């Protein structure tokens, strides 16, 4: 590519000297576009080759920018040659660092979207098959059993403490309980009626609250796109070079199935 650019510069210098002044601007714009596409695709399997290539392309962009400044402020100034060297080295290092960070962030984005998609599919499956409600009922039953066991333990302790009391007090309590049975029955009936009324009122309030929540909630069911480009699948599977376990191949199969869903025509 650099050789082709050099040939084009020589051609422009022979035919039209004025166009060579703008040629570096065109090269800079083209290199910005090509470098952005290069960072997205990472075409080489070796990451070090990708980083060196990315650093080289960013260095060309930096040199074109310095050449543009020299054209604006005067190309006869000697310090532009020093700036050209410094900017070339710095832009090469920045390109290597940026290429590596962009690759890592791009891979992490693919994995995070894939994980989010799997969680969403699992929740959707559980909602369709009413699995969440069953899990909730099981948790409630477990909590109720734990609560009943705690009550049984406290009641057993209280019974052990009360066994040492005299029988006379027990007889008096029995007589008092016989007198108060009728009052307790009436109070129990009234409490039961009040509980039923409270349950009905709470059901109406909860139903009204759920309706208001549905009205006020704004939720848009947008599909989660794991792979924005079909080249992302190859990037996401490069870990297989260092990991050849069954779990790794199973993950690749899951990624492949998801990729075929995103790009059915390709």
Image (spheres, rainbow, N blue to C red):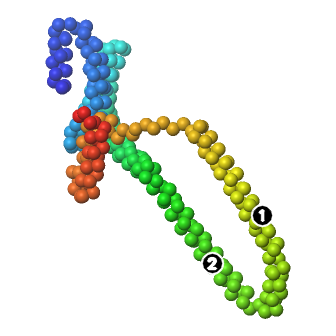
Label of residue 190 in the image: 1
Whether residue 123 is visible: no
Residue displayed at 26% across by 15% down? 23
Whether residue 22 is visible: yes
The answer to which quarter of the image holds residue 32 is top left
The quarter in which the C terminus is drawn is: top left
Along the horizontal axis of the image, is 91 left or right of 10?
A: right
Vertical placement of residue 13 versus 93, above or below: above
Q: Secondary structure at mark 2?
A: helix
Residue displayed at 71% across by 56% down? 198
Residue displayed at 30% across by 43% down? 258
The answer to which quarter of the image holds residue 186 is bottom right
Label of residue 22 in the image: none
Q: Mark 1 to mark 2: distance in Å?
A: 27 Å
Q: Position of residue 126 (x, y in %)?
A: 43, 52
Closest to the camera, between mark 1 and mark 2, is 1
Residue displayed at 46% across by 53% down? 130
- Front-lying residue, 144 or 11: 144
Q: Do the residues bearing badges 1 and 2 touch, measured as CB atoms within 8 Å?
A: no
- Front-lying residue, 236 or 91: 236
Q: Residues within 10 Å of mark 1 (few under 14, many from 20)?
A: few
Q: Position of residue 99 (x, y in %)?
A: 31, 38
Vertical placement of residue 248 versus 139, above or below: above
Vertical placement of residue 139 versus 157, above or below: above
Q: Secondary structure at mark 1?
A: helix
- The residue at which mark 2 appears reads as 152
Of the numbered discs 1 and 2, the one sitting upstream in the chain is 2
Q: Position of residue 152 (x, y in %)?
A: 63, 78
- The number of callouts visible is 2
Along the horizontal axis of the image, is 130 left or right of 180?
A: left
Q: Position of residue 234 (x, y in %)?
A: 24, 42
Q: Residues within 10 Å of mark 2 (few under 14, many from 20)?
A: few
């Amino acid at each position: 590519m650099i050789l082709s650019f050099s040939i084009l510069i020589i051609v422009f210098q022979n035919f039209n000297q004025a166009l060579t002044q703008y040629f570096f601007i065109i090269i800079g714009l083209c290199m910005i576009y090509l470098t952005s596409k290069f960072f997205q695709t990472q075409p080489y399997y070796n990451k070090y080759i990708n980083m060196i290539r990315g650093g080289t392309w960013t260095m060309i962009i930096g040199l074109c920018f310095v050449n543009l400044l020299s054209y604006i402020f005067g190309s006869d100034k000697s310090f532009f040659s020093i700036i050209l060297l410094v900017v070339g080295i710095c832009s090469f290092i920045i390109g290597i660092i940026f290429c590596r960070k962009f690759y890592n962030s791009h891979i992490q984005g693919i994995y995070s979207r894939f994980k989010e998609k799997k969680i969403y599919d699992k929740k959707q499956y559980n909602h369709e098959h009413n699995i969440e409600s069953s899990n909730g009922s099981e948790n409630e039953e477990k909590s109720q059993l734990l609560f009943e066991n705690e009550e049984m333990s406290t009641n057993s302790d209280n019974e052990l403490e009360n066994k040492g009391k005299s029988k006379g007090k027990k007889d008096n309590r029995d007589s008092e309980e016989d007198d108060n049975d009728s009052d307790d029955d009436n109070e129990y009936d009234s409490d039961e009626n009040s509980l039923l009324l409270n349950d009905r009122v709470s059901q109406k309030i909860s139903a009204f609250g759920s309706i208001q929540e549905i009205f006020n909630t704004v939720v848009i069911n947008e599909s989660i796109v794991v792979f924005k480009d079909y080249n992302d699948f190859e990037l996401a599977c490069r870990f297989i070079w260092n990991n050849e376990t069954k779990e790794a191949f199973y993950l690749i199969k899951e990624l492949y199935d998801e990729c075929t869903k995103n790009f059915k025509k390709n």
